[in-house]
Amino acid sequence: MSIIAFIGLGHMGSPMVQNLIKHGHQLYVYDLDNHAMQHLTKHGAIAAKSPADAATHADVLYTMLQTDEQVKAVCLGANGMFQHAKANALYIDSSSIDIDASREMHRQALSAHIRMVDAPVSGGVAGAQAASLTVMVGGNQENFDAAKPFLECVGKKVIHAGAAACGQAAKICNNMILGISMIAVAEGFALAKKLELDPQKFFEISSQASGQCWSMTHYCPEPNLVANVPSDNDYQPGFTAEMMLKDLRLSQEAARNAHAATPLGAAATNLYALFANLGHGQLDFSGIIKMIKGIEI
């Protein structure tokens, strides 16, 4: 059994904590949402007074936050976890943040004598609940080996992507593909409707043809075709459009810094920005089909 300080108890973090508890670990948890902490105490977690308080108890520090600013606020400074952690503690960051910020966190961890991996995940809330996430890990081999047993508590596939921040690079590139492909599938169904093609028939054909992709067969934006997806629940997330937009913006920042051409990534970013600006940022990202179906030219 290890003692883990887990910070960030949102849609993803909360089920990840529960799965770590199921594997026999003791969890000290913290979130600004007191209700989220109290919910997890019913599953055996201990509510900490602050991230620093959680860190003083722990062998492993774990964050699942939304932005690099939040990660830095939790970890750095006089009241951050790094100042209060045990020497040689292991830090796992499953937040999705920009690559430069992740590299900086690796440098800060090394200076504080803390072992670190960046370990963003893919699979959404359902994957977090089922402990079937794909985990993309950046860091040296020794730190990856130390983190892997904990990551296997929350994920089905744990892949060492490479050196520091390579996990973040993999997540950014993967989610750019996901955002683009979701829009493509939505456009396909919108066009099929205009051409008087039955959605069920189109799905039956495209899911077995060259248009097949994860967004089509596992997370279909058209309702009543795939079980247990947000389109069958009025597009309740899931993975919000706002979070997809954040990741797409990270992809475009990374592309600019790397001098890489990502024209479809840029177009997807603009479309999700429009969708969010129309007030739909808290819908699932597959809900963008509603906007695409409503566009007339």
Image: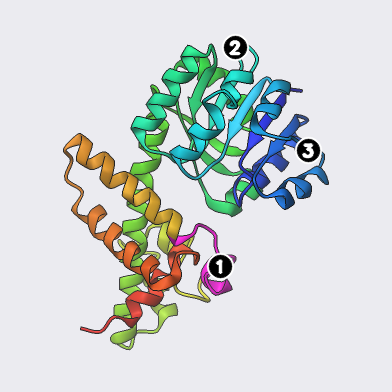
Q: Between marks 1 and 3, how big is the CA–CA gap?
A: 27 Å
Residue at the location (31% across, 58% down)? 180
**Residue 30, percent across and down?**
68, 39
Residue assigned mark 2: 88
How many neighbours does mark 2 have within 10 angstroms: few (below 14), some (14-19), or many (20 or more)? Answer: some
Instruction: Check residue 121 for magenta coloring.
Output: no
In the picture of the structure, the residue carrying the numbered disc 1 is 236
Q: Earlier in the sequence, mark 1 or mark 3?
A: 3
N-terminal-most mark, 1 or 2: 2
Closest to the observer, 271 or 195: 271
- Identify the residue at horizontal 42%, vertical 18% (top origin): 107
- Extreme residue toward the bottom, this view: 196
Q: Is residue 172 above or below residue 199?
A: above
Using a 10 Å C-alpha cutoff, classify the residue at mark 1 as few (fewer than 14 neighbours), some (14 to 19) or many (20 or more): some
Decide if residue 12 is on the left or right side of residue 163. Answer: right
Question: According to the image, label 3 marks what residue?
Answer: 45
How many other residues sit within 10 Å of disc 3, few (<14), some (14-19) or many (≥20)? many
Instruction: Inspect the image, locate mark 2, and give the three-letter code of the amino acid beneath it.
Output: Asn
